[in-house]
Image (cartoon, rainbow, N blue to C red):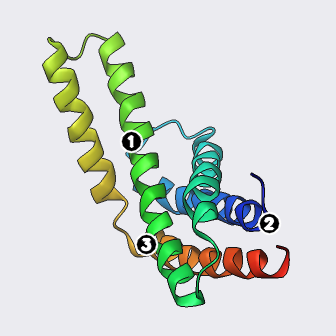
Amino acid sequence: MPTAGKLVAALLFAAVGYGAAVAFIPELPEGTQVKIFPEINAVIGMLVGWWVMGSQVGNPLLAAARRGLGTSVYLLFWADFVFSMRDMVINSTKFVYPTPTKAVLGFFDNMVAFFLMSLTPAVLTILVVGGLSAGIAAELAHRKWR
């Protein structure tokens, strides 16, 4: 059911996802195509904000801040998952992997590589500060517009 808390969480986590993606772009290898990379991360942030943070509003502000931080972790995981899967599919169509097992291992290698690349001060600051702020804002919106 749509609520103000879910809407605010979705919009703010879309902004967090977009900002984290823009901060992440310099970490990508030279020549990587990033045409709609921030927009895809914004959609992932919106979905995670709606489903994860939006479903957990209605608690004290400290709990909302904690859940906002947890939602940022979900955002990082799902963005990592989506783009690792994308790379695995692209590499599979180019016959980079000789067996399906190598493709699955390549997927996990990509996940680890993207995660390690995302451990920069800029990306982590956006995820932490944005997650805390978005969690509190979603809780306040829920309280104001029940």
Q: Where is residue 39 in the image (x, y as percent from the top left)?
A: 65, 45
Query: In terms of secondary structure, where does tag 3 sit?
Result: helix
Residue identified by numbered label 2 = 4
Q: Nearer the viewer, residue 41 or 75?
A: 75
> Where does the C terminus fall, quadrant-wise?
bottom right
Left or right: where does residue 26 sit relative to residue 85?
Answer: right
Query: In terms of secondary structure, where does tag 1 sit?
Result: helix
In terms of sequence position, does the residue under pointer 3 or pointer 1 come before the other?
A: 1
Q: In this view, does 33 lie above or below 63?
A: above
Q: Where is residue 143 in the image (x, y as percent from the top left)?
A: 76, 81
Residue identified by numbered label 3 = 124
Report how far apart the C-alphas of labels 2 and 3 lie in the structure.
Answer: 27 Å
Q: What residue type is labelled 1?
A: Phe
Task: Confirm or deny contact between disc 2 and disc 3 (CB under 8 A).
Answer: no
Q: Which amino acid does label 2 sit on?
A: Ala
Q: Where is residue 42 in the image (x, y as percent from the top left)?
A: 64, 51
Looking at the rendered structure, the number of numbered marks drawn on it comes to 3
**Which label is found at residue 70?**
none
Left or right: where does residue 15 sit relative to residue 85?
Answer: right
Q: In this view, does 61 lie above or below 96?
A: below
Would you call the spot at circle 1 few (<14 residues within 10 Å), some (14-19), or many (20 or more)? some
Q: Where is residue 57 in the image (x, y as percent from the top left)?
A: 63, 72
Q: Nearer the viewer, residue 69 or 104?
A: 69
Quadrant position of residue 4: bottom right
Residue identified by numbered label 1 = 81
Left or right: where does residue 22 sit relative to residue 7?
Answer: left
Q: Which amino acid does label 3 sit on?
A: Leu
Q: Which of 14 and 57 is in front in this view?
A: 57
Would you call the spot at circle 3 few (<14 residues within 10 Å), some (14-19), or many (20 or more)? some
Q: Is residue 82 above or below residue 136?
A: above
Query: In terms of secondary structure, where does tag 2 sit?
Result: helix
